[in-house]
Amino acid sequence: MIQNLSIDLETRSSVDIVKSSVYRYAESDDFDILLFGVSVNHGPITVYDLQQGDTVPAEILKALTDDTVEKWAYNSSFERVCLSVWLRRKHPEFFSSYGDGQYLDPSAWKCSLVLGIYNGLPLGLEKVGAVLGFEEQKLKEGKELIRFFCTPSRTSGRAWNLPEHAPEKWDLFKRYNERDVQVELQIQERLSKYPVPDFVWEEYHQD
């Protein structure tokens, strides 16, 4: 039985998220999820390579819209909004929402960024890992890989860089996705004795 999920997504969109918002980014017609990294019940991490034919199991898709299943991510608003759009478009049979009907209910989501901030840690997954001295650190190649696979291609003749255009980079991108979930899990474990109070989570969900 799934009780919690720890999630990290690698996505693409022609909308510059730095200059817009996650909502505009995810609602772009060319938005898509490339890699879906997840740990179920703090167990082994699986990276679903959606660009090369992997499919996310139905039990995980159901858990995404089950408000009794706790979902964790670093800056989880991004994952929640992106998964809302992706489910609506690709798996509407599993999608359920609240409010205006467009997005997943935030009440089932928790954020390891908020957990870190509450405990006085710096912003940024890489910085948190360094301060806490994790054995597994966020891969520093991530920014370059995101520019290559997650934004429109600068190479003439193709809209996007795909796995077949740079197989070695794609393999590293998958390891990057897996490592981010590892670091998120370590944050949850290391700070488990210093939980965020319920009233703060309520404020987070309202926000």
Image (cartoon, grey):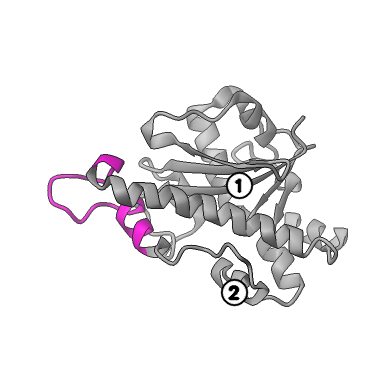
Whether residue 207 appears in this view of the structure is no
Image quadrant where residue 142 sits: bottom left
| Residue 145 colored in magenta in the image | yes
Answer above or below: position of 89 versus 169. Answer: above
Q: Nearer the viewer, residue 198 or 48?
A: 48
Quarter of the figure with residue 46: top right
Dot 1 or dot 2, earlier in sequence: 1
| Amino acid on which disc 2 is placed | Ala
| Within-10-Å neighbours for mark 2: few <14, some 14–19, many 20+ | some
Q: Which residues are magenta?
A: 144-164
Q: Residue at x 79, y 58 (%)?
A: 201
The image shows residue 153, relative to residue 84, as above or below, that is below
Q: Which residue is mark 1?
A: 7
Specify whether 88 is left or right of 205: left
Q: Residue at x 45, y 41 (%)?
A: 33
Please name the residue that numbered disc 2 is placed on: 130
Residue 55 at what x, y percent from top left?
Answer: 49, 28
Q: Position of residue 130 (x, y in %)?
A: 59, 74
* Comparing labels 1 and 2, the label whose residue is closer to the camera: 2
- Badge 2 marks a residue whose secondary structure is helix
Q: As drawn, which residue projects farthest toward the front? A: 135
Quadrant of the drawing holding the N terminus = top right
* Crowd class of label 1 (few under 14; some 14 to 19; many from 20; radius 10 Å): many
Query: Camera-side residue: 165 or 43?
Result: 43
Q: Is residue 59 visible?
A: yes
Q: Is residue 158 left or right of residue 147?
A: left
Under tag 1, what secondary structure?
A: strand
Q: Residue furthest top?
A: 93
Whether residue 197 is situated above or below residue 62 in the rendered picture: below
